[in-house]
């Protein structure tokens, strides 16, 4: 948990209508406080914070963002193709 980052992030994230619990969820999922725009885009595309830990073909969603520079749109499209959006964690 990144409790040290949370107080700094909260005011900026609140301007985008994130609650404190939502900020905590995104930070716990692996996003950084500077990933606000990414979180805004992911949320608008229906991607939940817990999706960051989902493993798709041996690679987590967060790794695809960090290591392969996937955009929020790339992530949402991939999760739709895999039929994972709106269904919870993959089995």
Image: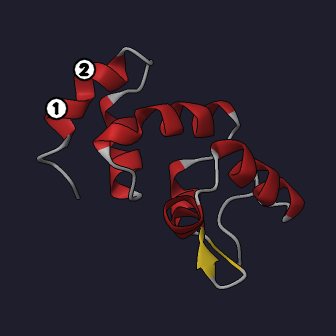
Residue at x-position 70% and y-position 71%: 90
Residue at x-position 71% and y-position 78%: 91
Total marks in image? 2
Residues at marks 1 and 2, CA–CA distance in whole angstroms: 7 Å
Could you tell me residue 10's position as x and y percent? 25, 28
* Cβ–Cβ under 8 Å for marks 1 and 2: yes
Residue at x-position 41% and y-position 34%: 36
Relative vertical location of residue 9 with respect to residue 77 in this rendering, above or below: above
Q: Which mark is residue 70?
A: none
Relative vertical location of residue 84 with respect to residue 18 in this rendering, above or below: below
Specify the quadrant of the image occupied by residue 56: bottom right
Residue at x-position 69% and y-position 53%: 75
Horizontal side of 23 relative to 41 (left or right) equals: left
Specify the quadrant of the image occupied by residue 89: bottom right
Residue that carries the numbered disc 1 in the rendered image: 8
Relative vertical location of residue 49 with respect to residue 37 in this rendering, above or below: below
- Mark 2 Cα-neighbour bin, 10 Å: few <14, some 14–19, many ≥20: some
Horizontal side of 12 relative to 48 (left or right) equals: left
Residue that carries the numbered disc 2 in the rendered image: 11
Q: Nearer the viewer, residue 29 or 57?
A: 57
């Amino acid at each position: 948990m990144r409790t040290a980052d949370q107080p700094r992030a909260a005011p900026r994230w609140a301007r985008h209508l994130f609650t404190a619990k939502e900020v905590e969820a995104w930070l716990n999922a692996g996003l950084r406080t500077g990933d606000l725009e990414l979180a805004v885009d992911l949320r608008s595309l229906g991607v939940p914070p817990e999706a960051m830990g989902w493993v798709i073909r041996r690679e987590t969603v967060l790794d695809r963002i960090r290591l392969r520079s996937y955009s929020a749109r790339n992530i949402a499209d991939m999760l739709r193709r895999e039929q994972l959006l709106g269904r919870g964690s993959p089995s």
